[in-house]
Amino acid sequence: MTTQLSKKGEAWSARFSEPVSDLVKRYTASVFFDKRLAQFDIEGSLAHADMLAQQGIISREDHADIQRGMAQIQAEIASGQFEWLLDLEDVHLNIEKRLTELVGDAGKRLHTGRSRNDQVATDIRLFLRAAIDDISGLLRELRLALVDLAEQHAETILPGFTHMQVAQPITFGHHMLAYVEMFGRDSERMTDCRKRVNRLPLGAAALAGTTFPIDRERVAQTLGFEDVCRNSLDAVSDRDFAIEFCAAAALVMTHISRMSEELVIWMSPRVGFIDIADRFCTGSSIMPQKKNPDVPELARGKTGRVNGHLISLLTLMKGQPLAYNKDNQEDKEPLFDTVDTVTDTLRIFADMARGISVKADAMRAAALQGYATATDLADYLVKKGLPFRDAHEAVARAVRTCVDRGCDLGDLSLDELRAFSPLIENDIFGVLTLEGSVAARDHIGGTAPNQVRAAIQRVRKQLT
Ligand code: ARG
């Protein structure tokens, strides 16, 4: 037995009398996915080494050697020359081993006062913080694109639906602004989650802290963390910050999915409310007439995997006693895939929102077909003194007559309308138009073009 790294490179080999099988090695290794954390691992190591030197725990020379070695490793990784070894299990051991090859004993001293447990927790937090910043920027771009679309269509009328049935006329701008609100809350959730991600685990070491005179605040400051994790057991073991992120990401995808569902329906030739630029669609290998909204459909589908990752992480965490357990190695793939899915989806949607063309005539025709101004007629009667329930009843009778005749409320003559209530007068026709209907909903949060423009101003201010 030897106290050095064995030929298999296992750092703990002196304790073991037989090597693991190839299958177990593959089963327990994480390097093929966690090498993605390399830049953060190096950043964390450099901050740790700086602190060790500052505190006199390692020498200035060792510190300089570590910096030099890490610079070379960074270059090797960037150029694709770095050799990742399964035998070295994970990103941390691969980098440390290479450092030791390059600079000797200084490389072996880097791990003083540290464990892979606090190291990996730090890496993930650095990774996630950067991902959150990207996602926040993309949410902003998507909101800007939707606000621009809303502005172009502040007055474009389409039917609003409840239960998938024509309910009341609304403006397309108002409809887009509903998504702007959803993505605005998603953005707030990301910002809020970032605060809890942005705390430093390093210093917790394996689980109980370290006997060396470390300076955790210095490391936190170097790495841009807002605070240090206040309990070593918690710092190395909990992944609630990642779960919280996945929950926020699942909501982003839920909103994307709702929007996708609408885009798909609107683009169906049966509905024909919009067209989506060709670069987001594909054809059929057999049906030459087809132009399919693949991007929204896939985004709706990918929502399932993000929801799944949230459940994976919750389940991963729920059975773990304190402190670190190897279960936590399983946090990475779901987290990486969540970040990739949300990032790609938002980037594509921000672009696609600018490739939506609105077919205002089709929207208008649909709004004219479903008695969309029935509530306006009822409100009109209430304003003339009729109790709302009685007004509702009178209008229901009028709609029934229209259904029988196959016409809309606005097609009835004044006399025909007065048969349902003598309170109806000539001013009713302004109320029954689509423009009159939307313009009348003129309060904060209403669909009137005035309000849409005011809401756009408000959001634009927020986004600058
Ligand atoms: N690859 C491990 C992970 O992802 C690093 C920490 C390993 N720690 C340990 N004590 N086995 O969690």
Image (tube, rainbow, N blue to C red):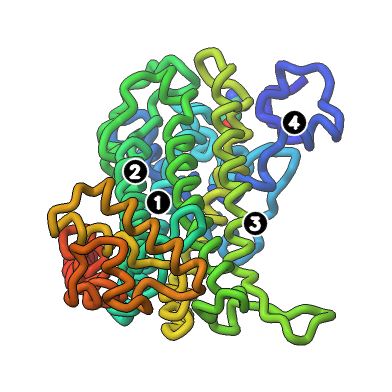
Query: Is ligand 1 within 8 Å of the beta carbon of the residue shown at mark 2?
Result: no
Dot 2 or dot 1, earlier in sequence: 1
Residue at horizontal 49%, vertical 31%? 111
Q: Does residue 51 sit above or below 174 in this rendering?
A: above
The foreground one among 439 and 69 is 439
Q: CA distance from mark 4 to mark 3?
A: 20 Å
The foreground one among 155 and 332 is 155
Q: Quadrant of the C terminus?
A: bottom left
Dot 4 or dot 1, earlier in sequence: 4
The foreground one among 155 and 429 is 429
Q: Amino acid at mark 1?
A: Ile
Picture quadrant where residue 152 is located: bottom left
Q: Nearer the viewer, mark 3 or mark 1?
A: 1
Residue at horizontal 58%, vertical 51%? 303
- Check if mark 3's residue and mark 1's residue have beta carbons within 8 Å: no
Label at residue 194: 2
Q: Amino acid at mark 4?
A: Ser
Which residue bears the numbered disc 4?
A: 6
Residue at horizontal 71%, vertical 31%? 10
Which residue bears the numbered disc 1?
A: 132
Q: CA distance from mark 3 to mark 1?
A: 28 Å
Which residue bears the numbered disc 3?
A: 82
Secondary element type, mark 3 = loop
Residue 244 point in image, percent of width and height? 43, 36
For label 2, the crowd category at 10 Å Cα-Cα, with few meaning under 14, some 14 to 19 and many 20 or more, is: many
Secondary element type, mark 2 = helix
Q: Amino acid at mark 3?
A: Phe
